């Protein structure tokens, strides 16, 4: 079910599976949802484990997620602001994008389980 929620949220933002970083972002979101304290040390707790899983350097993971963030910002900033529940004045960093999506999913899940 969580995989479907993440896929749905990414599709709402216009991110499709043809992006190199799609599955990296998806795993990053999953890791942060498992323990949102990982967001306090994103490089160590999220990018490195994702990089190990995908056989690349953690800088590549961050860059790929940043590319997705840039695409979302250029194509659908209104939807991103809606999901973030605040006005964004600039494209979010990779870690901010992860945090925004995680918070949105956590909010939606708390509504489901109330």
Image: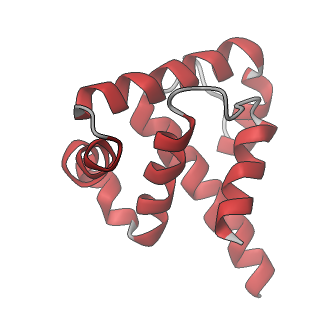
Residue 85 visible in this rendered orientation of the protein: no
Residue 67 visible in this rendered orientation of the protein: yes
Picture quarter containing residue 78? Answer: top right
In the image, is residue 84 above or below residue 19? Answer: below
- The residue lying furthest to the left in this view is 44
Q: Answer with left or right where residue 30 lies relative to residue 42.
A: right
Quadrant of the image for the N terminus? bottom right
Q: Residue at x 43, y 60 (%)?
A: 32
Q: Residue at x 72, y 32 (%)?
A: 16
Q: How is the image coloured?
A: secondary structure
Q: Residue at x 57, y 36 (%)?
A: 22
> Picture coordinates of residue 92 (x, y %)?
50, 26
Front residue (pair 111, 29): 29
In the image, is residue 29 above or below residue 86? Answer: below
Quadrant of the image for the C terminus? bottom right
> Picture coordinates of residue 73 (x, y %)?
65, 18
Picture quarter containing residue 15? Answer: top right
Q: Answer with left or right where residue 5 lies relative to residue 38.
A: right
Front residue (pair 83, 31): 31
Q: Answer with left or right where residue 81 lies relative to residue 60.
A: right
Front residue (pair 110, 11): 11
In the image, is residue 18 above or below residue 73? Answer: below
In the image, is residue 74 above or below residue 78? Answer: above
Q: Answer with left or right where residue 87 lies relative to residue 63.
A: right
> Picture coordinates of residue 50 (x, y %)?
34, 47
- The residue lying furthest to the top in this view is 74
Picture quarter containing residue 58? Answer: top left
- The residue lying furthest to the front in this view is 55
């Amino acid at each position: 079910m969580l995989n479907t929620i993440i896929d749905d949220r990414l599709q709402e933002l216009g991110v499709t599976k043809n992006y190199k970083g799609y599955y990296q972002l998806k795993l990053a979101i999953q890791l942060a949802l498992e323990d949102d304290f990982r967001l306090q040390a994103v490089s160590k707790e999220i990018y490195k484990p994702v990089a190990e899983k995908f056989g690349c350097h953690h800088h590549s993971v961050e860059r790929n997620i940043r590319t997705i963030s840039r695409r979302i910002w250029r194509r659908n900033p209104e939807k991103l602001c809606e999901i973030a529940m605040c006005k964004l004045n600039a494209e979010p960093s990779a870690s901010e994008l992860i945090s925004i999506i995680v918070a949105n999913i956590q909010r939606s899940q708390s509504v489901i389980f109330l």
